[in-house]
């Protein structure tokens, strides 16, 4: 390395790196201030030290890895999966179901997206591929009724995990957000401490809108975790830092492709490393 | 979203500390443009695009007269707004679809989940209802589970014919066969719904390249999600290199995404935005207006 000094240019490069990764102006400027402060306090001499400090700060923002939460009181754990249109909910559900099945769980799926064309077929096809039952009704039926059916089926069949697929919805649509609340209530009738996970799925290529999405979903029905999909793209998913930090909601999984095996538990360190990786 | 307020407030805050009399000085303008750059990045405008944009605004702003009625902050905003419209707007007619082929073929490409299949149906409906054409929808996604059923269901809803083949068929063959089918069915515009793909997926990009060269579509439209962040530029560049895009359609504009990605794509590739998707239903497709997107990017 020719020069490893702390220069204005180095600071600019760090700023660009963060902004280009969709970390956003707010979080970026907060991080830069924090780093300037640490450079003084810790008498840092080199750019590498600053970069190392940035990695630490970024990793800290992401919080501790948090595994899926299973019900302690009820034999059935319910996972409700929500998010804006096309983010990767249905595919991620198939991946999670497959993973949980391989871990020895008895999983059942609810085709709660009765609105989008062939959304039910899509989940059913995944169900066949991974050999997991899918409870569904006809297109345009009430999603609440589907969830009700699925809860009953789960109990009858002795399933221990029910994952509910929902239609994509923009966080700005009040009626659609209310519909989620209704689904939530139906789940709570069967399983009072449920849903045990409210997972929001966000596409890694999303920019600053991701934070608005997460805030609105959190306000309306609460979130227990986030799944970031399409990390196999060229995007870095930098909104994750603001989402995890501002809302205190952990990232639980990363989607890395369209195949059923392309889902990995979230690891803050490697997520941060990927930010710095040259392509 | 009160982003415009905060941008204008921030600008006013800056100008309050300065003289703000007569003409805008370089110092005034530099301070203001830092705020503008941040606002653009908050709206998902690509970092580099935002920088170049601000440079252009700077040239126009320095020395501009601060007229009686406009405050310096409003003056800068108005220059920014005009310049945004300039970058976003093509010349008249560029936003129209090229429909002169025999029959014209419209191919939709883009990342996974951006809205291609839904947009194919919307376009079919639009061309039939607004232009009196007879569209054929073509299901060329052989990868996503139930992708063919999705387009078939949309076609049924709209009573539009859909050309499809059994699972396992080659997407290139499907598109070529569809041309023949359109002639038989007397359809006079063909809309190809292709599978979602990453711009860095070599094999999948080769597939769209082959479809393009075999079918020679008259429009190759990038369907891009309005919520896309900084990577939009790279995605558009890669698709443009592979298939020579003719324009883009910006989807999911019914939410509160600012849509800065469209400015980035436009600035880097020169591609016109042809339509905007504003809902999940098949009638939620509207022609593009540069001034509206400019206001939106500024949060007005
Ligand atoms: N490359 C890549 N593609 C993905 C990933 N996850 C999902 N996809 C693709 O993204 C597209 C949309 O995925 P879906 O699972 O249908 O998304 P959804 O959120 O259920 O969509 P709606 O129900 O329409 O809101 C599909 O083409 C998936 O194959 C991922 O991790 N990587
Ligand atoms: N709110 C809203 N949703 C949209 C719009 N356009 C498409 N969608 C939704 O976005 C999701 C993805 O749309 P699709 O048409 O399946 O996207 P695609 O690009 O074909 O997806 P792949 O084939 O998996 O790559 C669906 O839930 C659509 O209903 C829009 O303009 N507004
Ligand atoms: K990536
Ligand atoms: Mg879905
Ligand atoms: Mg599709």
Image (cartoon, coloured by chain):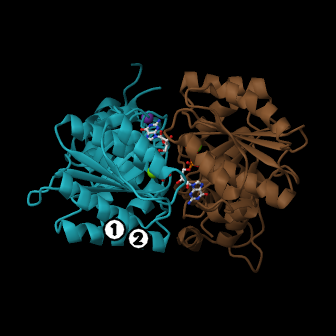
Chain colours: A cyan, B brown
Q: Are marks 1 and 2 in contact (CB under 8 Å)?
A: yes
**Label 1 chain ID:** A
In the rendered image, is residue B242 in sight? no
Using the image, determine if residue A214 lies above or below residue B225.
below
Q: Residue furthest left?
A: A73
The chain letter for the residue carrying disc 2 is: A
Which residue: 76% across, 51% down?
B274
Label ID, residue A179: 2
- B15 w.r.t. B68: above or below: above
Can residue B4 be seen at all in this image of the molecule?
Answer: yes
- B246 or B6, nearer to the observer: B246
Q: Quadrant of the C terminus of chain B?
A: bottom right
- Give x and y (percent) for residue B98: 85, 44
Ligand 1 is within 8 Å of the C-beta of the residue at disc 2: no
Residue B293 in picture, x, y percent from top left: 68, 61
Horizontal and vertical percent position of residue A112:
39, 58
B200 relative to A26 in the view: left or right: right
Q: Is residue A176 above or below residue A133?
A: below
Residue A65 image label:
none
Which quadrant holds residue B18? Answer: bottom right
Q: Mark 1: few, some, or many residues within 10 Å (few <14, many ≥20)?
A: many
Q: Residue at x 58, y 55 (%)?
A: B40
Q: Secondary structure at mark 1?
A: helix
The residue that appears at 9% across and 57% down in the rendered structure is: A72
Q: Is residue A240 left or right of residue B152?
A: left
Given the current orientation, which residue lies at the most extreme top position? A1
Q: Which residue is mark 1?
A: A183
- B270 or B114, which lies in front? B114
Residue A119 drawn above or below residue B1: above
């Amino acid at each position: 390395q020719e020069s490893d000094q702390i220069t204005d240019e180095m600071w600019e490069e760090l700023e660009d790196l963060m902004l280009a990764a969709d970390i956003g102006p707010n979080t970026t400027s907060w991080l830069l201030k924090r780093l300037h402060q640490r450079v003084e306090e810790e008498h840092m001499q080199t750019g590498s030290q600053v970069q190392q400090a940035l990695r630490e700060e970024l990793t800290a923002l992401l919080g501790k890895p948090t595994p899926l939460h299973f019900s302690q009181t009820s034999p059935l754990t319910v996972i409700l999966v929500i998010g804006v249109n096309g983010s990767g909910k249905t595919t991620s559900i198939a991946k999670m179901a497959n993973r949980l099945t391989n871990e020895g769980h008895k999983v059942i799926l609810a085709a709660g997206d009765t609105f989008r064309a062939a959304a039910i077929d899509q989940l059913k096809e995944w169900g066949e591929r991974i050999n997991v039952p899918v409870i569904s009704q006809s297109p345009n039926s009430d999603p609440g009724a589907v969830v009700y059916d699925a809860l009953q089926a789960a109990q009858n069949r002795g399933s221990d995990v029910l994952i509910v697929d929902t239609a994509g919805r923009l966080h700005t649509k009040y009626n659609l957000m209310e519909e989620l609340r209704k689904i939530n209530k139906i789940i709570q009738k069967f399983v009072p401490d449920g849903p045990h996970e409210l997972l929001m799925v966000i596409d890694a290529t999303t920019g600053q809108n991701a934070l608005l999405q997460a805030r609105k979903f959190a306000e309306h029905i609460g979130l227990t975790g986030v799944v970031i999909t399409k990390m196999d793209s060229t995007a870095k998913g930098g909104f994750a830092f603001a989402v995890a930090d501002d809302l205190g909601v952990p990232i639980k999984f990363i989607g890395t492709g369209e195949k059923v095996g392309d889902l990995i538990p979230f690891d803050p360190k490697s997520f941060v490393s990927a930010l710095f990786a040259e392509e | 979203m009160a982003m415009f307020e905060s941008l204008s407030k921030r600008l006013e805050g800056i100008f309050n500390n300065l003289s703000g009399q007569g003409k805008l000085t370089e110092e005034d303008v530099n301070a203001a443009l830092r705020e503008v750059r941040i606002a653009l990045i908050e709206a998902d405008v690509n970092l580099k695009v935002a920088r170049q944009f601000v440079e252009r605004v700077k040239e126009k702003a320095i020395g501009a007269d601060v007229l009686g009625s406009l405050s310096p902050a409003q003056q800068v905003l108005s220059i920014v707004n005009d310049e945004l419209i300039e970058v976003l707007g093509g010349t008249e007619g560029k936003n129209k679809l090229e429909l002169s082929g025999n029959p014209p073929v419209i191919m939709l490409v883009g990342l996974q989940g951006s809205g291609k299949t839904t947009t194919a149906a919307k376009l079919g409906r639009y061309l039939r209802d607004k232009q009196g054409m007879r569209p054929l929808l073509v299901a060329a996604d052989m990868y996503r589970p139930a992708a063919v059923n999705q387009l078939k269901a949309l076609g049924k809803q709209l009573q539009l014919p859909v050309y499809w083949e059994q699972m396992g068929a080659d997407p290139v063959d499907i598109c070529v066969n569809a041309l023949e089918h359109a002639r038989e069915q007397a359809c006079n515009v063909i809309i190809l719904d292709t599978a979602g793909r990453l711009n860095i997926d070599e094999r999948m990009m080769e597939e769209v390249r082959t479809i393009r060269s075999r079918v020679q579509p008259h429009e190759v439209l990038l369907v891009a999600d309005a919520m896309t962040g900084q990577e939009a530029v790279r995605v558009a560049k890669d698709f443009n290199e592979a298939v020579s895009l003719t324009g883009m359609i910006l989807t999911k504009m019914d939410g509160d995404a600012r849509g800065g990605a469209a400015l980035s794509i436009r600035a880097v590739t020169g591609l016109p935005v042809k339509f905007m998707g504003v809902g999940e239903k098949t009638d939620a497709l509207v022609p593009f207006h540069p001034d509206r997107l400019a206001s939106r990017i500024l949060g007005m």
